[in-house]
Image (tube, rainbow, N blue to C red):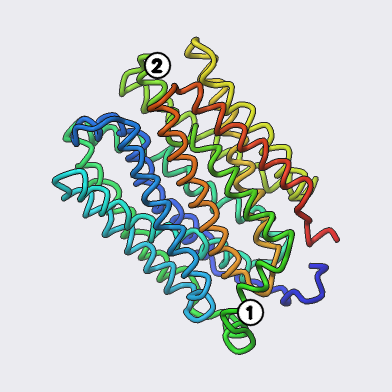
Amino acid sequence: MRDGSSPPERRYSGKFFLPSLVVSQFAASPLSILTSLFLVDMALTFECSVGILGQLSTLSSIVAVVFALTMGALSVRFKHKSLLTIGLLSILISALGCFLALDLNSEFISYSLYGVGLAMVGPMTTTLVGEHLPLKKRANAVGWVIAGGSLAYFVGAPIMALIAVLGSWRLTLLGFVVPISLVGILLTFVGVPSTSPLHQQSISNETYFESFKGVFSNRSATACLVGNVLRSAAFVAILLYSISFFREQLLVSMDSASVIILVLALCYTLGSLVSGGFVNRFGMKPVTISTALLAGIFTIFFTYVSNLWLSLASASIGCWFVGMVTSSSVSLTLEQVPKSRGTMMSINTAAVSLGSALGAAVGGWALILFSYQALSIILGLMGIVAALIFYFLVIDPTRT
């Protein structure tokens, strides 16, 4: 790395290291699948509208924002492996609570704990990549970690749909979400090292205040956070509301919806995986800008065509670019403040969660007051604005 203040490169050759991070990210996604695939069914269970139940995502995202800011300090003091494990435990408890929920209020309370898990799992997986892998391997590793979350959709959606046919959406929690969380916890114990030279250095040389100051005094780092708020808000249109759009507006059946979510997840996964190659060739910043712009455009377009195949094609291409921009923007953010990666990525998780809450809230109200078309154009424009912020205000520290 060309930044003279950056820590020396380290390598961790454990064969279970990257797989454990990928599986941890995988385990963090099934509860999102629940609200994406079964939002209509859950609304019927709790006798409320889809727009109101969509606020489950808003609440969990708000909780993730608050807790991720706390994580910025905790990541300086505690082992990152321990924080990752606690995050997976939080997701496990949230799933059990959602299974047992008897009314809408208890469902909201249980699902909010999912935000705690997201606030811990997301930043710790990427922070561990930054600590234990050299620069030339990080972009591809981040791509795999991001893809781990979308692979959960590709693998989990059909399994959860099948389980729901055999029982109900509640049964998917015990049949899939809980076991996957347990596997993630086990692999974390086996594959992730307990100590880190960088972590020990940050405890002895930096105060909590200095760690936060190092992030917010950096204009490029702050711009990254703002850009990530907007791009994550934008893509809620596809990631949360697209399946409901296909079911309600284009009259797609549940069986067909489970296939569509597979297609979208596959496109997102492939976008995440190929992003590393594009980043290594063209750079993190150009890839982030171009893919954010294209994702925003296709987010707007997919609800404006009445033909199912054209709409699905547009949403699929949008998901491809969402996967690319997610991976490339995380890589770009990871390199902004190398000496405070744990704090930077925790604050970034708060930013992404804030964006998700903003997208879910704005999207939900746009859907209640107007239409799916209004939802997509409002959120898609946020993605385009994010591309402009990355272009004008963010720098790539590895190329300066």
Q: How many marks?
A: 2
Residue at 68% across, 48% down: 276
Percent x, y of residue 72: 53, 70
Q: Is residue 306 left or right of residue 251?
A: right
Label 2 amino acid? Gln
Q: Measured along the vertical axis of the image, is residue 284 above or below residue 124? A: above
Kindly identify the amino acid type of the residue bearing the numbered disc 1: Glu
Of the two numbered discs 2 and 1 in the rendering, the one whose residue sits closer to the viewer: 1
Task: Kindly indicate the quadrant of the structure image that contains residue 400.
Answer: bottom right
Identify whether 142 is placed above or below 82.
above
**Farthest residue, direction bottom:** 204
Outermost residue, right side = 400
Does residue 1 show up? yes
Q: Which residue is mark 1?
A: 210
Which residue in the structure is indicated by mark 2? 249
For the residues labelled 2 and 1, the Cα–Cα distance comes to 51 Å
